[in-house]
Structures are given as C-alpha cells and as structure tokens.
Amino acid sequence: MYQLNIYYKTVYITLWCAIFFSCGSIHQRNKEAREDEKTLHKSIESQRLIQYSTFASKETVPVDEALDSDSADDPAIWCNKNDMEKSRIYGSNKLGGIYVYDLNGNVEQYFQYGKINNIDIRDYHGNSYIAGSNRTDNTIMISRLDSNGSILISTTVRIPLDMNPYGFCLGVSDNSLFAFVNDKQGKIEQWQVDVSEPKNTRLKRTFNVKTQPEAMVYDDKKYLYVGEEECCIHQFDILTGQDIIFENSRNHNNENISYDIEGLCLFNNAGEEYILASSQGNFSFAIFDVSNKRYINSFKIVGGNNIDGVEETDGIDINQRIMTSEFPKGIMVVQDGFNTYNEIAEPQNFKIVDMQSILHLLEK
C-alpha cells in the first residue's frame, strides 16, 4: 500500500509541478520539490532511507485555495482545559488568513486576516492569544481567544514592523509576553508586547543569522531556537545573545537532514526536552536532545488510516497538554505540502498525529 501511495503521489506531484509552472512561478529563495521534478524525485528517494515511520490519525479539511497554490503553512494548537475534546487547531493560509479546526479536522471558523505566514499561541495573564506574521501590511497580528477557542476579531492588535515579516513565534517569561519575528535577510526581532496598551509595545532585542531563517520556537525560559533554512538550528540565549549551533542539524554532518530546515517545535519526555524539526528536502522529521544538542532519530509520516502521507512540510506544532481517549499523550500537527484523497489531488492541508507514536521513537 505504501509503495502504491508513493507511486500515485509521484504522479500527482509531477502534475502539480507542471500546473505550477504553467501558472507562473512564485518567488521563493530555495528550490523545492514543487518547483523542480529532479528535486522531487531526489526527495522521494531520500525519504526511503529514513527507517522509522508513523501515520496521521486525522487530517484537516483542505484550504480553500487553488490546487496549484502553496497556501497552507503553519499550525498552532490550543488546549481547552475545561473540555480537552473541544481543543482547537489553527492553520495559517499564507494567501489570506487563519483557519480554526476541531480535533477531527473540521473547519470551525476562517478569518481573512491577510497573508499570515507563521502563527503561535500562548496563555498570558489568564487569557489565550494567537498571533502571527502578517505579510499583507507588514505587522505582527495578535488576537485573544474566547473560552471556546474562537478568535475574537474585536481584540486584534497590529504591531507595525520595518521589515517584511516571515517566521514568527510567541513566548512568555519574566511576566512578559514576547513576539519574535524574522525576515528573509536573516534579521530577528524580539518585541515585548503590551496587549492592554499596544502603544507601549517595544522592540527589545535584535539577533541575526547569515542566511534565510523561518521557523522559530521559544522555550519560555531564555532560549530562542531558530531554523536557518539552508544551514542549521540555532539556540540563542536572549539575555546574552550567545548563539549555539546544533552541529548535527547540518546536512553535511547528518545524512538524515536534507535542507530546507523548516518547522520547529519543542516537546518533553521523561523530564527531558527535545526539539523536532521538519527536514523538508527528504520529507522527514528529525529529533534532537536540547540539553546536549545531540541528534536522536528521524521519522517519516506515511499513508495509513485512509489518509495520505506527508511531503515537504513547512510548519509543525506539538501540544502535550491535550490528553483525550484518542490522543492520551497529546498531538502533533504538521502541514502537508502535497495532499491527496483516494489518490486524487487536493489543495494543501494539515495532518494530525498521535504523539504516542513519536515518543515511542525515543525508546529505539
């Protein structure tokens, strides 16, 4: 079944590439599988070298965009502490807004915010906030969620930027809410956000990497993790500016890494902290131990449960606070760059994975 799915996926993605170029290419810095047939086949062959695999338990409704569009990008997960079954998944459509899904992947809401690229969620002073990088008006967008996880449009705050924003994440530490945003030139800004008095929001620090970054995640202590797409994973100490590199996140040091490094997220197991990165060039995901920067393992998401596998992932997120009968150890949500249903091409969507299957890899 997996070999058959790969065959149909290869045919589909090849056709997708043809459609993409016939419509005119979208400017992207790095060549991806959707842009080049040779890159596509190389990625598929490289993925075969990844030993471990899992599959999605559920998937979201596809984004409402053209089949040839690169639209779905970054997920974020909100835990409903009062009823975990009613927790929510949010997905950015970087061509127009944010989707709100239930845990079955059904659309609850859609908000046309503009070209929201990356999104994140944090609890702060008794409220939950969703925020993202808005490339339509070059702002950071922040909105509050209500008790059901609905986005309260009336609470939306926009922080103007002197950059065209790209990657984004939120963080809370020292009783402050922080927003981190980067651009394609390697600039990273840390903003201290005042949600009650937005005019008091201020730029606190600036960091830099040499080439294009995107994915970022903050540990709510003092470390910001940044994925420099064609280089490595960085750990920045936001207090001192010290930059430590995960050396085994470089592809010339690790045969299981194939650029670009895209989504990043943190998770815990048995008291230890790990970082997960999507290795876009071989359609896989790599796990690193945060304490010693050691590479642990890689896995791929293949077809199963009548759901297709995952290719060329952008954003990822994990929430281990959600503990339901179906997901007793939490969930991972990943963007799927090439989505099919019954071997028929569909617009991009997000896949929902039982976190138990990821934690199991740490035992191997």
Image: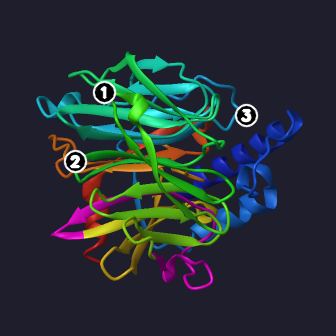
Q: Which residue is mark 2?
A: 175
Q: Which residue is mark 3?
A: 68
Q: Which residue type does callout 3 highlight?
A: Asp
Quadrant position of residue 251: bottom right
Q: Which residue is mark 1?
A: 196
Q: Which residue type does callout 2 highlight?
A: Asn
Quadrant position of residue 193: top left
Quadrant position of residue 102: top left
Label disc, if present, on residue 145 of the rendered structure:
none
**Along the line of sight, the residue nearer the viewer: 188 or 326:** 188
Whole-Å distance between the Cαs marked 1 and 3?
A: 41 Å
Above or below, 45 relative to 114: below
Q: Upstream in the sequence, badge 1 or badge 3?
A: 3
**Along the line of sight, the residue nearer the viewer: 151 or 161:** 161
Q: Residue at x 35, y 28 (%)?
A: 197
Whole-percent x, y for residue 118 in the image: 51, 42
Q: Is residue 23 left or right of residue 44?
A: right
Q: Which residues are magenta?
A: 243-272
Element assignment for label 1:
loop
* Quarter of the picture holding the C terminus: bottom left
Residue 328 is inside the magenta segment: no
Q: Upstream in the sequence, badge 1 or badge 2?
A: 2
